[in-house]
Amino acid sequence: MTQNLAFVFPGQGSQAVAMLAELAQTFSIVEETFQQASAILGYDAWQLAQHGPEEKLNQTQFTQPVLLAADVAVYRVWQQLNQAEPIYFAGHSLGEYAALVCAGAIDFADAIKLVAERGRLMQEAVPAGQGGMAAIIGLDSDKVNVLCQQAAEGQILSAANYNSPGQIVIAGHTDAVNRAVEQAKSVGAKKAKLLEVSVPSHCLLMQSAAEKFISVVKAMTWQQPKVAVVNNVDVAINNEVSAIQDALIRQLYMPVRWIEIIEYLSQQNVDVFMECGPGKVLAGLNKRITKDIATQSVIAESLRLALIPQ
């Protein structure tokens, strides 16, 4: 019986030194995808993905193109195996770009250029040490929003990622984030933890980057997606190129609504979520959002299929 698949692509936080090493040993398309990216980027993306250093891999201007290459490489492996086509795509933050590449909305080479510039503009927008992010565990979205309002004290602070029930990431000025972390337990949070990130994503500190990003997005060649992509900012499926572009620009300074994305897909006759990228971050989030639909690893399933005699 054919299953309805929704492919979900992870964003920053899924990268790790030596990611996709086992997959690359079995499928040459993995390194070939990174070679394509390297030719555009001007540095060896595969070398960085395999050997680091970790500090460099975690700098957003490097993380974004390298992780995009990883997500797309995993999907290309799936295609090589002639497996079932997905009926929906969605990507968490940066993962939305991989979803759009795999849906045929933008060419891989253009997307690499796009996210490399996105990462550069984001890094440039907030000087080091002036912005931060933190994970708040055990509070619902309303309480997190109130916490942000109280801790902001005139600075920028807001929810950045609605990841799963009871796990929300906040972003803003460093001092405001620190105040929120200090105050979180007193308002009922189980845990509040500063994240090691180089930029405060998905908050108004990224608005200047978004304004500069407009011309970069418009300069690329776009097409209507061949597979429906549920976007981050509106939890909507856009087929018009202008609407896709607008959503990507707003995504820089608006929150990722992952809980709503998974809830929406759960109502669309999806049987299985397939995590298309390194790690199992989305599998963990999805399990907390819906118990009814499993999330499988495309990497694990591809390696399993490769062992089956043809």
Image (tube, rainbow, N blue to C red):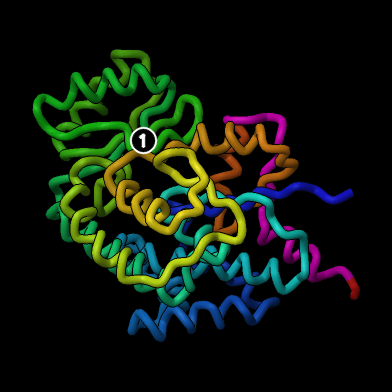
From where the camera sits, is residue 256 visible? yes
Question: Horizontal and vertical percent for residue 157?
Answer: 21, 32
Q: Nearer the viewer, residue 105 or 140?
A: 105
Residue 12 makes an appearance in the image: no
Instruction: Name the element at disc 1.
Output: strand
Mark 1 closeness class: few <14, some 14–19, many ≥20 residues within 10 Å: many
124 relative position to 307: left or right: left
- Residue at 44% in and 30% down: 167
Which residue shows up at 79% across the image and 63% down it?
304
Q: Amino acid at mark 1?
A: Val
Q: Residue at x 27, y 18 (%)?
A: 146
65 sits to left or right of 3: left
How many marks on residues? 1
Depth check: 33 or 281 in front?
A: 33
Point out the residue furthest to the top here.
187
* Residue at mark 1: 169
Magenta range is 289-308
- Image position of 119 with respect to 204: above or below: below
Q: Nearer the viewer, residue 223 or 292?
A: 223
